[in-house]
Image (cartoon, rainbow, N blue to C red):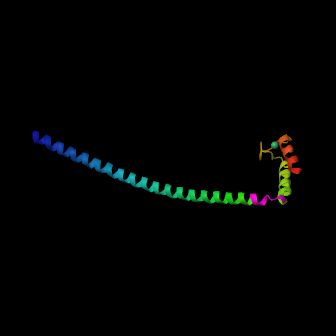
Amino acid sequence: MKDRNFLDTVMEFEQQLEAMQVQFGALKQFVALMMEEHKALETENDHLRARLDELVAKEETVQVAAVKKTSPLDIGEGYDNLARLYHEGFHVCHVHFGSLRKGEDCLFCLSFLNKQNV
Ligand SMILES: [Zn+2]
């Protein structure tokens, strides 16, 4: 009776070991999956960072070019562009710049354009 009990215990232990092996296999698969995903995210992150650097550099180039372009000779052209933008229905004042005027005149815009015109 005692021996029978012992055999049961050993068999039960074997079953537990088998179950643990299955669990361990699943855990290994999960870790492998996580590592793959981590690698993919890292690569994507690197790409996005490079792209961002590219865009920032481009933006800075454009800004430098814009600053260079704003020589005294070009002020008239800048004014024309702003005036055209205003007549197309957009704010050019610093308060609402770029938003739609919805057909109403804006005192900020007008005073800004008047100042530029002098
Ligand atoms: Zn305005």
> Residue at (10%, 42%) from the top-left corner?
3
In the image, the segment drawn in magenta is 66-72
Apparent side of residue 25 relative to residue 61 in the rendered image (left or right): left
Q: Quadrant of residue 103?
A: top right
Q: Is residue 35 above or below residue 103?
A: below
> Residue at (73%, 60%) from the top-left corner?
65
Q: Main secondary structure of the magenta part?
A: helix
Task: Specify the quadrant that holds the N terminus.
Answer: top left
Is residue 5 part of the magenta span, yes or no? Answer: no
> Residue at (24%, 46%) from the top-left corner?
15
Q: Is residue 3 above or below residue 41?
A: above
> Is any atom of residue 106 visible in this view?
no
Picture quarter with ligand 1: top right
Q: Position of residue 82 (x, y in %)?
A: 83, 51
Q: In terms of depth relative to the viewer, which is nearer, 11 or 25?
A: 25
Q: Position of residue 90 (x, y in %)?
A: 81, 47
